[in-house]
Amino acid sequence: MDANIVGSLVFAVPAIAAAWLLLWRSYRPVFWSVLAMIVIATGYLNATGAARDIAGSVGWSTVATAPAR
């Protein structure tokens, strides 16, 4: 799996889970707004390369390897 995907999942999944637990029952419109902000922030992290850094900080190898021939 690509390091960008791993970094995005490490960032987004806990944020979405926390938003769901805190906001789903009582403030549903606020939950949808927070979800949109999480998606935008995840896209920003991917665009700037920070998602790859996040994956590296959790122990995922960020070194690109050549495909097998």
Image (spheres, rainbow, N blue to C red):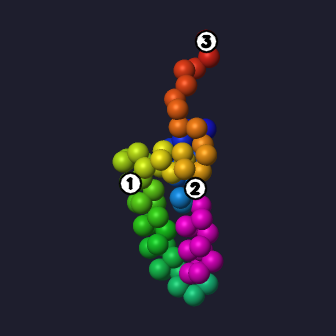
In space, the residues marked 1 and 2 are separated at their CA atoms by: 14 Å
Judge whether residue 31 is colored magenta. Answer: no
First in sequence: mark 1 or mark 2?
A: 2
List x then y, in percent, for residue 21.
63, 77
Pinpoint residue 37: horizontal percent, then vertical percent. Answer: 42, 67
Q: CA distance from mark 1 to mark 3?
A: 34 Å
Name the residue tied to disc 1. Answer: 44
Residue 10 - label: 2
Image side of residue 69 versus residue 35, left or right: right
Q: Residue at x 59, y 73 (%)?
A: 18
Where, quadrant-wise, is the N terminus in this rendering?
top right
Please report the bounds of the magenta region as a residue range: 13-24
For numbered disc 3, what is the local secondary structure? loop
Secondary structure state at the residue bearing disc 1:
helix
In the displayed structure, 44 sits above or below 17; it is above
Q: Of the residues shown, which amino acid type is indicated by label 1?
A: Tyr
Q: Residue tagged by mark 3?
A: 69
Identify the residue at image location x=43%, y=49%: 50
49 vs 17, nearest the viewer: 49
Q: Residue 2, image x and y in percent?
A: 56, 38
Quarter location, residue 44? bottom left
**In the displayed structure image, the side of residue 22 where residue 41 appears, left or right:** left
- Toward the bottom, the furthest residue is 26
What secondary structure prevails in the magenta region?
Answer: helix
Above or below — where is 10 with respect to 69? Answer: below
Q: Secondary structure at mark 2?
A: helix
Residue 3: % across, % down: 54, 41
Amino acid marked by disc 2 = Val
Quadrant holding the C terminus: top right
